[in-house]
Image (cartoon, helix red, strand yellow):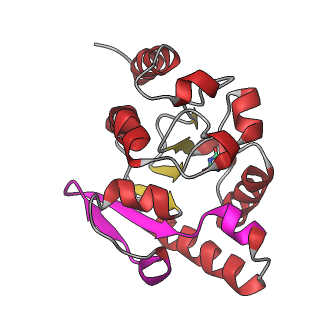
Amino acid sequence: MFTKEELMEIVAKRVENCTACPLYLTRTNVVVGEGNLDTRIVFVGEGPGEEEDKTGRPFVGRAGMLLTELLQETGFRREDVYICNVVKCRPPNNRTPTSEERLACKHFLLAQLEIINPDVIVALGATALSFFIEGKNVSITKVRGTPIDWLGGIKVVPTFHPSYLLRNRSKELRKTVLEDFKKAKSFIKEV
Ligand code: URA
């Protein structure tokens, strides 16, 4: 029997050695994810940015600071949840990862979610949302805050990406995301 830590270490090693898409050519570090493997809630972003690529840690730049703030306001400590991304290597100039890049990386996120087996996943932005609703063309603005049943039992709550909040400094938007985080928290099953 492997522990969750051992299983995640195997995933991390495989990510580090991955050359399945061209993003490996330009990465400084892979960004696997971090946090508590026993958490009931996982936050999924799009892909590493500049700071994340430099440090190998998810959400440590400006968007990350905002995410950490929002987590605290929801009543979480950053270290109690798990944070990761759809793709594990930085797309050059922070462009949106292509469908080929997402497909090449897909099995890593699936493995991570299988290991953690959370009650709820918060999909941060359109790229994360599209991971969970494969093939369907829905707008994040329309579906944010509406939970999706994923793989029979896991709730996925889509909301805006923190970078979007940084670009549109509106108090209303921030409040909306905070409400979505709180809704997601309400899906955590009490044991
Ligand atoms: N944006 C993301 O989607 N992920 C990160 O890790 C950082 C910024």
Work out whether 25 lies above or below 139. Answer: above
Judging depth in this view, the residue of 18 and 119 nearest the camera is 18
Q: Picture quarter containing residue 63?
A: bottom right
Residue 146 colored in magenta in the image: yes
Work out whether 159 lies above or below 5. Answer: below
Image point 40% across, 34% down: which residue?
105
Judging depth in this view, the residue of 93 and 176 nearest the camera is 93
Residue 162 colored in magenta in the image: yes
Whether residue 11 is visible: yes
Where's residue 173, x and y in %?
Answer: 68, 81
Residue farthest bottom in this picture: 172
Image point 80% across, 53% down: which residue?
62
Where's residue 91, x and y in %?
Answer: 60, 40
Image point 43% across, 55% down: which residue?
121
Looking at the image, residue 41 sits to the left or right of residue 114; the answer is: right
Judging depth in this view, the residue of 174 and 168 nearest the camera is 168
Q: Picture quarter containing residue 104?
A: top left
Q: Picture quarter containing residue 138?
A: bottom left
Where's residue 113, x and y in %?
Answer: 37, 40
Look at the image and give the residue range highlighted in magenta: 141-166
Image point 47% across, 74% down: which residue?
140
Work out whether 7 lies above or below 55. Answer: above
Whether residue 189 is visible: no
Looking at the image, residue 29 sits to the left or right of residue 137; the answer is: right
